[in-house]
Image (spheres, rainbow, N blue to C red):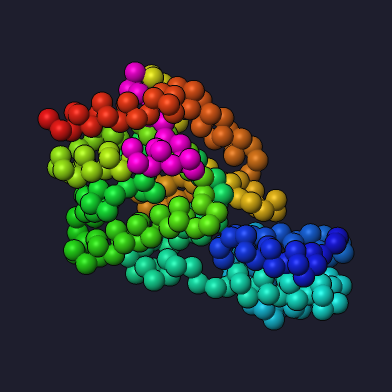
Amino acid sequence: MRVPDEGEGMTLQRAGGPVVRRVVLGTQLRRLREAKGISRVDAGYSIRASESKISRLELGRVSFKERDVADLLTLYGVIGESERLPLLELAREANEPGWWQGFTDVMPGWFQPYLGLEEAAILIRTYELQFIPGLLQTMDYARAVVAGGRRLDGADVIERRVQARMSRQAIFERPDPARVWAIIDEAALRRRVAGPAVMLEQFEHLLVLNANPNITIQVIPLSAGPHPAEGGSFSILRFGEPDVADVVYLEHLTGAIYLDKPDDVTRYTLAMDNLALKSAAPDDTAKVIERIASYHAM
């Protein structure tokens, strides 16, 4: 296998956050290992680790020790400095803390990998059944949602959770902003999670976002009938690196599921496409939002 040269390595490091960098580095290490015909057991032995540890490293599920990466590169015959340095630098970049590390005390561990993926995604397609998607929420709307679902938490914890949610929206402000395609169930828009002032501000915010060329919002009407996503909300994330597969994110009350097998991703992609066809056309979104906003103004 050809190892990226130094210029390619630098481009790779800027491509995404630490979670995606781990996936990219893990994929490259797996390809190097397979090209040499070395088993995961033997690779693990070389760094005093188990076969399962090598598997987790290659999947990008755990952080890397630079020494381990260096030993694996030597085992795989990557000796030249021009070949090693970009991969070792990528290992250092992959271990940098994400912005969400400052909120780990108020954020479940199973959600943190999603934040890394979301930060690095170039396209996020999301279907939301219960609420307006977090990336599109105003602060007051987010506060009402968080407070309603976390009634046992103190005001300080709720506020920090709201701050974390607002921090996610920085993906719209970067030089290469993510594209977001949100399909919102009409029931989510009609749900009165807060008073009229908060709801109307939220709808005004949606209208502003709807005019952003990087954001597509569709509303699936209650009259659409049955559809493939009745099981609940989900998101599909796509990345700019060919080594990183699309990921489907499913959240439930006590955890989350991350799917990246092609068959699973294809099934959810088809479901999302079906939802888009059953939803009001993007050109009609503003009219739909304004109509439902009048319901909250009463």
Residue 41 visible to the viewer: no
Q: How many marks?
A: 0
Residue situated in front as seen by the camera: 49 or 271: 271
- Which quarter of the image is occupied by the N terminus? bottom right
**Where is residue 73 shown, x and y percent of the image?**
79, 73
Question: Looking at the image, is 253 positioned above or below residue 3?
Answer: above
Residue lying farthest left? 298
Residue situated in front as seen by the camera: 102 or 53: 102
Q: Residue at left 68%, top 75%?
A: 89
Find residue 162 and report its image quarter.
Answer: bottom left
Q: Which residues are magenta?
A: 207-223
- Which quarter of the image is occupied by the C terminus? top left
Residue lying farthest bottom? 67
Find residue 26 and report its image quarter.
Answer: bottom right
Residue situated in front as seen by the camera: 130 or 13: 13
Q: Residue at left 41%, top 31%?
A: 218
Find residue 38 and report its image quarter.
Answer: bottom right
Residue 42 in the magenta stretch? The answer is: no
Q: Is residue 2 left or right of residue 63?
A: right
Q: Residue at left 61%, top 50%?
A: 239
Residue 216 in the magenta stretch? The answer is: yes
**Where is residue 209 shown, x and y percent of the image?**
38, 42
**Where is residue 253 shown, x and y percent of the image?**
35, 49
**Where is residue 61 shown, x and y percent of the image?**
59, 62
Q: Is residue 110 left or right of residue 248?
A: left
Q: Residue at left 56%, top 34%?
A: 269
Residue 278 visible to the viewer: yes
Question: Looking at the image, is 153 positioned above or below residue 254?
Answer: below
